[in-house]
Amino acid sequence: MNSPAGQQVRAQLRTDENVLASLEVDLTPDLRFANGLLVLTPQRMIFRNAEGVIRDWPLEAGMSLRLLDHGGVGTLELHDEAKRHELWRFTLARHPQALLLMQKFEKIERRLLALRDGSSLPAEDEEETLCPTCHAPLPPDSEECPACARQQAPQTSTWVLLRLWRFAKPYKNQLLLGFLLTLAATGAQLVAPYLTIPIMDKILIPYQNGQKIDPGTVVFYLSGLLISAVLAWVLGWARTFVLAKVSERIGSGLRTQTYDHLLKLSLDYYGSKRTGDLMARIGAETDRINLFLSLNALDFATDVLMMMMTAAILFSINPWLALVTLVPLPFIAWMIHMVRERLRTGFEKIDRVWSEVTNVLADTIPGIRVVKAFAQEQRESDRFADANKANLEANDRVNKTWSLFTPTVTFLTEIGLLIVWGFGIWLVAGGSITVGVLTAFIAYIGRFYSRLDSMSRIVSVTQKAAAGAKRIFDILDHVSNVPDPQNPVRLPNDVKGALTMEDVSFRYGSRSVIKHLDLQIKPGEMIGLVGHSGSGKSTLVNLICRFYDVSEGSIQLDGVDLRRIAVSDFRRNIGLVLQEPFLFFGTIAENIAYGKPEATREEIVAAARAAHAHEFILRLPHGYDSLVGERGQGLSGGERQRISIARALLIDPRILILDEATSAVDTETEKEIQKALDNLVQGRTTIAIAHRLSTLRKADRLVVMDRGEIVEVGPHDELMAKEGAYWRLYMAQARRAEEDAEAAGVVIDAASRVASKAPADPSSAHA
């Protein structure tokens, strides 16, 4: 849309018209190369052809868009119930754009049909996460675009695992010690086969030829075998202990750094992720990597050293026999190369499918009351069974490959051993080598092939670890959309709390939510944000808290742009009470002191008193030391909200934000909290959102929002006198309250009439 054609189309847009999707058409209907631009808005489709001619088609109920592709050419057709209006052709390089345009059009189509038929409007679909390169929708819980992945060279599993070196670098000295111990232990293990040569040639074969056995010689060689075995055991124990200890620390550092990075990411990252998936990445994936580092990588290093040292000894004994030993190696290497990537992609699919299993658990267990209230146990059971079945099928596909690979490697090593036996017997018969040399060769080859077989089995574990590491690095490579500045401006201790919004605009994807908003809030002023649902009130609060950064314009605190202030430094000056209070598992006191862990018991009690929570806390079995369940399930909604308010008040913020702070409390409790807030907002900049407009009558100013814009600003009485947008909201709410009161009165009246007709004596009812 930044091209000349895009600018020309943008100039045709009305002020209330936003671009939802666009398609760069690069073919004419008769399949000649020419550039055009197709744009979709909520009201119409606009097309600019190569000659600069612009046409548009207003969208009406019954219109449909059809996407076809054949022979490398895509076709998009616009139809209504009677005829085809237009068609556009494009090469398949534009296919991701066409898919996105189709998805946006289908949403508009469903909305228009619902309006025509008088049915309820469909719920807004979740905003798609788009690839920053080709702008195609990304799969759920993934930052990797399938379209781009096919065009780019894939990151090999070896490279992914080598990236773990940054976590191992602090322990390089311990790793060097472990390598030296591994080298020594492997060398000690190779002594025993070499001693079979003199045992066979100097003791056993001469004895068969009638010579006597020298006891001293026997003791000497047997002592050598014993010493090498003991030395290999001691060195192996030391090697395993050192490397296992290091690998545990590498895994712990990986887990900690991943979690720390996750906490620094902005809220939009969590909006496209499932809780179960993130839990699986930090838990199961890091455990898998840790297991690989502590056991399998150690075994792999040992196997490589054993094979290299064994091959060197074999070539020193007899080069021709050693060459025969290596016959199966090219075939095994070719099989490993063929299987490796298939296993890696298979394990990545298993990880994604397993995340779906954990997602079901993460959804169902916290929401078990809702599941039981609506009797949906069987539905959730079926959902879990489907996810488990998909996990089973993904594992079966990997096991099908693995079950063929492993026996084939074993078979090839057996064939190699058979070849060595045959060639060795021929060399013994020709007098080229002795029986002792052949025996030692067979012993070494047994170890060589066993290590080769072990290495082939490690391929599976390596690909599992690589798939897990890739999912971990997906988190670590993600950059926060709310970054800290390079040289942050330090806030003074006496922050005044003046907020200035200049030409603020914000978009969720391609949907404009806040449009060119200007507002100044004085220090200590109380502002009430009002408006219909979806008018942008909560989004504006999120921008003020810097959960998101503005798309255009700026928000300033005491004249300093928020983007120049360190995020943590800025948020220490904000007290936030959310519409849905969230409490952590722990005591009441710990939850109140969450923003100020060093707070004294007196400060905690004072905050609870200010929030009118002290009385009900004292009625709990252990008072402030009473445990609340996960997410505060042991308390009522009003009690959770009051603890949430106390938590915000304890940090004594310069800016207080109340997002429907009294929505979860009854009328009497709301009055108590309102009395406390009337005192607490003095001298503190306060921004309050409330559906019950009567709770905002004491605000210094009311800001009325509609479709992301400010339509009115002023005190309650002034806005009521204007009889504008605020007056309409207030009157509509008053009428609704009257209707609710009348309905309640009818119910009470009916109940009283039923009660008056009931017999006074219970025994007469039985009669």
Image: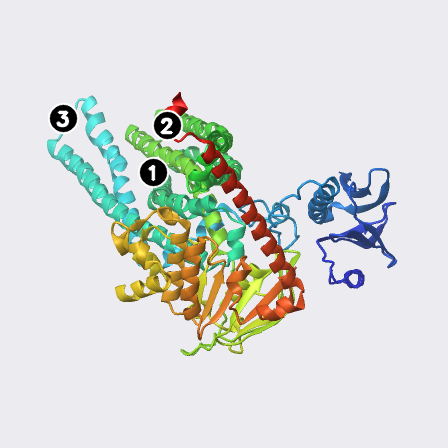
Q: Which residue is drawn at 48% across and 50% down?
A: 160
Give the alpha-carbon distance from disc 3 to disc 2, as whole Å. Answer: 117 Å
Report the mark closest to the observer, 3 or 2: 2
> Looking at this rendering, what residue extends furthest in the top direction?
767
Q: Label 3 belongs to which residue?
A: 212
Q: Which residue is drawn at 30% across and 58% down?
A: 589
Give the alpha-carbon distance from disc 1 to disc 2, as whole Å. Answer: 109 Å
Percent across and percent down for residue 26 are 80, 51
Quarter residue 37 falls in = bottom right
Q: Are marks 1 and 2 in contact (CB under 8 Å)?
A: no
In this picture, is 485 found above or below 460?
Answer: below
Quarter residue 537 falls in = bottom right
**Which residue type carries mark 3?**
Lys
Q: How crowded is mark 1: few (under 14 residues within 10 Å), some or many (20 or more)?
A: some
Percent across and percent down for residue 445 are 35, 33
Percent across and percent down for residue 430 are 37, 26
Residue 762's label in the rendered image is: 2
Q: Label 1 belongs to which residue?
A: 317
Residue 547 appears in the rendering: no
Drawn side of residue 326 relative to residue 614, left or right: right
Q: Which of marks 1 and 2 is nearer the N terminus?
A: 1
Question: Closest to the observer: 293 or 184?
Answer: 293
**Which residue type carries mark 1?**
Ile
Give the alpha-carbon distance from disc 1 to disc 3, as whole Å. Answer: 28 Å
Percent across and percent down for residue 410 are 42, 28
